[in-house]
Image (cartoon, helix red, strand yellow):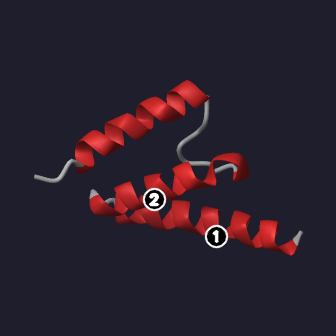
Amino acid sequence: MRQDTRLGQLLEAVFIELQQNPNKPSEEFLPLYDLQERSLTNLRKNEAAKALLQQILRIQEEVLGK
């Protein structure tokens, strides 16, 4: 049995503890946001996953441009 729902709950708790917005990625926590994007995909929340992935890619492009 997959634990996608449980992972989503754990990620929510982590974002709260870190005082981070799960929908607005920051460079410092990109690996966590990447995991969030994959979790959303597995939960079939494709629009939310797509929006988050676009933001992640934008940040990665900015970092590579530095």
**In the depicted view, which residue is nearer to us: 14 or 25?**
14
Residue at point 62% right, 48% down?
A: 24
Helix, strand, or loop for circle 1?
helix
Q: How many labels were placed on the picture? A: 2
> Which circle marks residue 37 in the picture?
2
Is residue 3 shown left or right of residue 53?
left
* Image location of residue 37, percent across then percent down: 45, 59
Q: Residue furthest right?
A: 66
Dot 1 crowding, Cα within 10 Å, few <14, some 14–19, many 20+:
few
Residue neighbourhood size for the residue with mark 2, other residues' Cα within 10 Å, grouped as few (<14), some (14–19), many (≥20): many
Q: Let me know if residue 44 appears in the view.
A: no
What residue is at 44 percent from the left and 62 percent from the top?
Answer: 49
Question: Up-down: is 18 above or below 47?
Answer: above
Mark 2: which amino acid?
A: Glu
Q: Name the residue under label 1.
A: 57
Question: Along the horizontal axis of the image, is 43 left or right of 54?
Answer: left
Q: Which of 51 and 32 is in front in this view?
A: 32
Q: Residue at x 72, y 63 (%)?
A: 59
At x 41%, y 64%, the residue is 47
In the rendered structure, which amino acid carries the disc numbered 1?
Leu
Residue at the far left in the pictured view: 1
